Amino acid sequence: MLVALPALLMVAASSVVAWLSDVAPADLTQDPATLLGYPSYLGLFSHLGIVLWAAAAAIAVFAWAVLRSSDRERARYFAFAGLLSTLFAFDDLLLLHEEVLPHGVGIDEFVVMGAYGLLSLAFLIRHYARIVVEGPALLLAAVVSLGISVLLDLWDPSDVNVLVEDGFKLLGIGCWLGHFGRAAARLLSLRPT
């Protein structure tokens, strides 16, 4: 039941949204490229980024679950990383900082990006010692690449080659995933079977 519950809740919530609004059920369930008749490669970098964020979140949450009763400090490191990765995945999936929060809620994009930056900085400061132990190179590459992408986006996206901006973003997400994947793999290789 625990495995099926999230899917059942999504179907129920989508049904309620469709019933209470003018949103067609297919608009909530089908792929945008299919709905709009666009090529399947539309948004490829965005889709890959979301998959990589989700993979990082899943790895971090799994590592947290393995560690939560035996090594609480290390478990907190993975829990924070899992929450950040999940937040960033949903931000990319739902266009939170670009559309939903600025236009739907009235929170400026700069404020949202600043909050994300502060959360990321809090993670880096709080877990600095753990990051050093796990090997900081990939995480540093992730922070630098994502930072460049954000700066290019906020600077003036119309004047920046979008491939460069999104390329840095995808590289950063990949390095983020690599860091936590390697840390979790090291954790599992040290545990007795």
Image: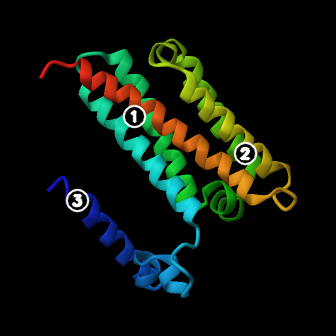
Query: Circle 3 sits in a helix, a strand or a loop, which is it?
Result: helix
Between 45 and 61, which is closer to the camera in this rendering?
45
Looking at the image, which is closer to me, 133 or 92?
133
Q: Identify the amino acid type marked 1.
A: Gly
- Distance from disc 2 to disc 3, alpha carbons, whole Å, reads 36 Å
154 displayed left or right of 137: right
Q: Is residue 67 visible?
A: no
Q: Residues within 10 Å of mark 3 (few under 14, many from 20)?
A: few
Secondary structure beneath dot 1 equals helix
Q: Give how far across and how far down residue 127 sits, in percent.
A: 51, 18
Lower sequence index among marks 2 and 3: 3
- The spot of residue 187 in percent (x, y) is 30, 22
Residue tagged by mark 3?
A: 5
Q: Is residue 181 above or below residue 42?
A: above
Q: Which residue shows up at 48% across the image and 47% down it?
A: 53
Image quarter where the C terminus lies is top left
* Distance from the alpha carbon under mark 2 to that under mark 1: 24 Å
Query: Could you say where residue 170 lies in the image, as x and y percent from the top left?
Result: 59, 49
Which of the marked residues, 2 or 1, is nearer the chain's N terminus? 2
Residue at image position (19%, 55%) is 3
Location of residue 117 (image quadrant): top right
Instruction: Residue at 66% x, 40% y: name it.
Output: 146
From the image, tell me which residue sits under label 2: 150
Disc 1 from disc 3: Cα separation = 27 Å
Question: Can the viewer see residue 165?
Answer: yes
**Three-letter amino acid code of the residue under disc 2:** Val
Which amino acid, mark 3? Leu
